[in-house]
Image (cartoon, rainbow, N blue to C red):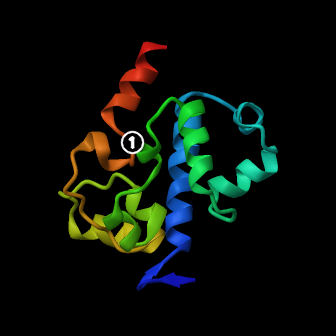
Amino acid sequence: MIFHGMKLEPIYRAIGTIIRRRRRRLEWSQRHLAARLGISRAALANIETGRQRVLVHHLYTFADVLEVRPGDLLPPAKAVEAGGAVALLPIPGDLKPEQKAQIARLIGPVQKTDEPKEMVDGTSAQIHRRSARR
């Protein structure tokens, strides 16, 4: 589906990727997070892969349970425009041409990020600090 020139599927894949990364950073299983959210593990698995769309009010619940701000669960617009979850991968900008070619064969074209390292994976430094305190 396309909305004002933007494909929706990459948005939901990227949101799912951010949720999955945060869950893993907290070292929680899908079953644990799903129980805290009051949804099935299968529904969470579908959300994490982008097969199931997340409603706005659900983002607030996810954010509360994952101890982040709702906006932290949204991918940067330029990442979505660049193709969704793959664009969220932290890829250094100083790769040699042969390294870029290898990555392109594996995941698609390499896109240099201009964001600071703390934002490359779609999460803020605040999230990392919270995790470190536990």
Q: How dense is the environment of label 1, judged by Cα within 10 Å: few (below 14), some, or many (20 and up)?
A: many
Residue 4, by quadrant, is bottom left
Vertical comparison of 107 with 60: above or below: below
User: Residue 99's spot in the image, x, y percent?
Assistant: 30, 64
User: Residue 52's spot in the image, x, y percent?
Assistant: 69, 62
Give the position of the N terminus as an image quadrant.
bottom right
User: Residue 87's spot in the image, x, y percent?
Assistant: 39, 63
Vertical comparison of 6 with 103: above or below: below
Q: Which residue is mark 1?
A: 123
Q: Kindly identify the residue that appears in the image at 78 percent across and 43 percent down.
A: 39
User: Residue 72's spot in the image, x, y percent?
Assistant: 42, 44
- Residue 29 can be seen, yes or no: yes
Q: Is residue 77 left or right of residue 1?
A: left
Count the labels in the image: 1
Outermost residue toward the top in this view: 133
Q: Is residue 98 left or right of residue 61?
A: left
Which structural element holds mark 1? loop
Please name whichever residue, 131 or 2, is drawn nearer the observer in this view of the structure.
2
Q: Kindly identify the residue that appears in the image at 56 percent across and 54 percent down.
A: 56
Please name whichever residue, 62 or 99, is drawn nearer the observer in this view of the structure.
62
Q: Is residue 120 left or right of residue 59?
A: left
- Residue 24 can be seen, yes or no: no
Outermost residue toward the front in this view: 57
Look at label 1 and name its amino acid.
Thr
Please name whichever residue, 91 or 60, is drawn nearer the observer in this view of the structure.
60
